[in-house]
Image (cartoon, helix red, strand yellow):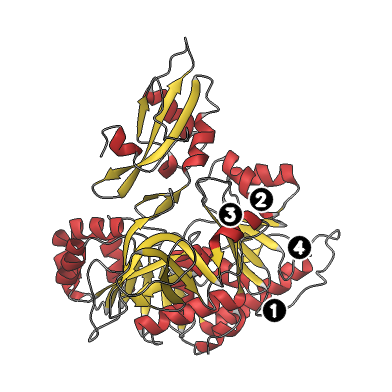
Amino acid sequence: MPLPTLRALLEAGHDDAPAFLAPGREALTYSGLRAHVDRTVAELNARGIGRNDRVAIVLPNGPEMASAFVSIGAGATTAPLNPSYKEREFDFYLSDLGAKALVVEEGSTSEAIGVANRLGVRVLEIRAGDERPSGEFEFVGEASEESQPSTGGGPAQADDVALVLHTSGTTSRPKIVPLRQSNVCASADSIAKVLELTPDDRCMNVMPLFHIHGLMAAVLSSLSTGASIFCTPGFNALKFFTWLQESDPTWYTAVPTMHQAILGRAPRNQEIVDAARLRLVRSSSSSLPPQVMADLESVFGAPVIESYGMTEASHQMTSNPLPPRARKPGTVGMAAGPEVSVMDQEGGLLATGAIGEIVIRGPNVTAAYESNPEANASSFTNGWFRTGDQGIMDDEGYLSITGRLKEIINRGGEKISPREVDEVLLDHPAVQQVVTFAMPHEKLGEEVAAAVVLREGVEATEGELRDFAAERLVAYKVPRTVLFLDEIPKGATGKVQRIGLAEKLGLA
């Protein structure tokens, strides 16, 4: 049975075994991590923050971000946010979350701080340093006299919310996905079982830790088995092989675009590649081209395991298995955690070989979106969660994704809401109409594009609009192509149709 809480999950590690490591840093052992978690929960309680209180975390990638997620999540609700967000984005997310506190590193200049002060969200600074074990930190300053100790203190319980993340939507504002302690622990257990993790394993994490992929697949799955995580500052193709040599991992997980960048630099790092002891390579968050899978297996001499995940499922839903069972390139494997099926529009489950919407149910799946009855009504049918993805299952239970029903842009694993980009560009005084859409990209899968109708008598260039967006959006959301049109193509009912727009405009 999966462990039901983050604090209980940590008991899997031996006292002197390393939990977190980082470049040039001493390891934080499991006994040290457990003590750190208990101190952090007590410090939060003293500051009036307890179970189910929401704490936004804006920290750079690395061991402190990993341990903040675990230690804060052991006694409150974590809400990791992308440190690259702009003021406008922080204003939305901190407001929408109802955050009680914001955690940043000491001396941070993040735009989140000014937003938090304006919203009345308490800012908590943490202090770390190279002289401390990887991931260990302390809160700066004492709990103020105004802070009332939390009445809901102590370790979180299985039904408490451990993590809240937003998932982008095209027809409405981004939705809040609350994931309980039991959800995330069930997911960690499923991933660990698929990958057959043991205390001897070490994951080198290159994934951002404000995404479900890195939090679950790299961090929690490892901790659930007493394994270790080498926490890098984030993906960097130029430093990947140096870290590979230093950390000596048994596996890593990444998105396809990262794998492709790694392959590009592998020949000039052949000595490190030859010495690597990788037991497996994992890929998730977007489709892995079969050619890339074959090249990775050839370079590293290890099986590549492609998995399929999403936020609402606490990440993993299906996965290809380890040898000697078959890995089927082009599929996302078999059910690996929740039950997985394919459903028709009316809610009927389809037979093997039929194309329909992929649906899931199980202990790692969110119970509902928060405060969003419309989304819940359309997303849950007879206890099944509708993923919005279209797929087909073969007679061995391997799932292939044939298309996406939703209009989310998947830029190399980064999910972007077109409507969010629309709203930013519409703030420009020259823009009368805009529709953001996905256009095909050779390496990323999809790229962000926007079709714009300017106000009569007003001029603007593509560069001006991109610069305008870049001041208000994180870089990966900024359209790489802006087309100026006299009229935006519409469907028969007069609605703008994002899907297929790239083809209509000659961009496919």
Q: Determine whether 500 is above or below 325 in the image.
A: above
Pointer 4 residue: 142
Q: Secondary structure under badge 4?
A: loop
| Mark whose residue sits in front, 3 or 4 | 3
Which residue does the numbered mark 1 point to in the structure image?
A: 155
User: Is 151 or 15 nearer to us in this picture?
Assistant: 151
Foreground residue, 247 or 176?
A: 176
Q: Residue at x 34, y 53 (%)?
A: 412
Left or right of residue 111: residue 391: left
Foreground tag (3 vs 2)? 3
- Quote the CA–CA distance across marks 2 and 4: 28 Å
- List the residue tagged with mark 3: 175
The label number, if any, that marks residue 96 in the structure image: 2
Res. 381 image quadrant: bottom right
x%, y% of residue 261? 25, 55
On screen, residue 495 above or below 364:
above
Compute the Cα span from label 1 to label 4. Answer: 21 Å
